[in-house]
Amino acid sequence: MTQNTYHAGKNKVTFKSFGVDLAGDLYLPEGFDENKKYKAIVGASPFPQVKDQIPATYGPEMAKRGFIYLGFDYLGMGESPALPGEFKQSRYMFRLIENTWDAVSYLGTLPFVDEIFGLGVCQGGSIIASAAVTDHRIKKIAMVSGMMAADAFQWSHRDRANQLITASTASMQKMYETGEPDYVAPFGLNDEMSRQDFIDLGINPMAGETYDYYGRDGAKGPVAVTNYTNMHIGDQVMQSLISIGEAYADKITQPSLTIYGTSAVTAPCSTQFVEKLTNEHQELALDEFSHVDFYHKPEAVKASTDAVAEFFNK
């Protein structure tokens, strides 16, 4: 774990998880004073993002609102190493949860941290919801465009899901036998494809907005974020299909806030999750924003971070 002289703005840090050093960015508010106490947020990012994407957007915004925010690269992603004998770009759900618990532990070592909250975007919503079930050090959670209700989004077409599983297990077998990584484009988008080529594939109902963020020419694609790639380890589907945020919804005891766009294809992942909650809960449904708008569109990011700050400050 790094020892730093901390300052307002972005601080490069590391913390231990699975015995290796995960790379993080710790965003501290203006006028930061190590002798004071602050509310802190552990951030969880969408699949397959690195800390220079969503965390680099939400971190400064939450710091502006007086919070400490930790964004980090999960095991095998970005600047964080894979485990010995494993491959990069291997973002697995249960490891993401444990990485998040370790991020909470790291924040708990900082003498200027008071309460700790969780903020997840897209898959990060499921990570935070799942991590919070048995980690009550996390006092409140907020999920933006969250993918908690996996059944509604990933299992509605069972034949398609089983096709993905077949390809995923074949990739796992190949990697086991060869000892080499098998990288694929999980959403059909590779690092070289044009926007129109991706739309023409006809496999992603959010193709345009997805490309505008993740594509070669996108706002946070592989050209804009040099340590990011759309290519991922080939057995990822086996992990994402058992994303468990929805399954444990009624076990969450912390107060929670769910934010989503009503026009988003992914809206049921929030609404069906909310239906299963039994905790103290707030819901913010915004008609004007789509799923990816909350990643980077200034008006959507402002709406979500304002709401999260108000909720965490109550």
Image (cartoon, grey):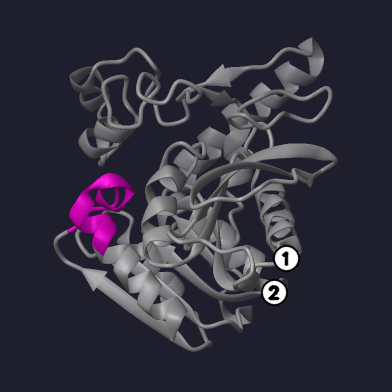
What residue sits right under mark 2 in the picture? 137
- Residue at point 27%, 27% (across, down): 218
Q: Position of residue 209 (x, y in %)?
A: 23, 38
> Looking at numbered disc 2 in the image, what kind of residue is underneath it?
Arg
* Element on which disc 2 rests: loop
Give the extent of the magenta segment: 289-302
Q: Which residue is more in the foreground, 114 or 281?
A: 114
Q: Main secondary structure of the magenta part?
A: helix
Residue 295 covered by magenta stretch: yes
Q: Position of residue 86 (x, y in %)?
A: 77, 25
Tell me if 45 is positioned left or right of 5 in this view.
left
For label 2, count other residues whose C-alpha is less than 10 Å away and answer few (under 14), some (14-19) or many (20+).
Answer: some
Relative to 59, is 134 above or below? below
Relative to 141, is 69 above or below? above
What residue sits right under mark 1 in the picture? 108
Point out the image quarter for the C terminus: bottom left
Point out the image quarter for the N terminus: top right
Tell me if 303 is positioned left or right of 79 in this view.
left
For label 1, count other residues whose C-alpha is less than 10 Å away and answer few (under 14), some (14-19) or many (20+).
Answer: some
The answer to whether residue 271 shows anywhere in this view is no
Relative to 82, is 276 above or below? below
- Residue at point 19%, 56% (across, down): 299
- Residue at point 79%, 30% (across, down): 83
Q: Is label 1 in contact with label 2 (beta carbons under 8 Å)? A: yes
Q: Which residue is more in the foreground, 99 or 60?
A: 60
Tell me if 102 is positioned left or right of 216 in this view.
right
Give the Cα separation between the discs numbered 1 and 2. Answer: 9 Å
> Looking at numbered disc 1 in the image, what kind of residue is underneath it?
Gly
* Element on which disc 1 rests: helix
| Residue 78, quarter of the rendered image | top right
* Tag in front: 1 or 2: 1
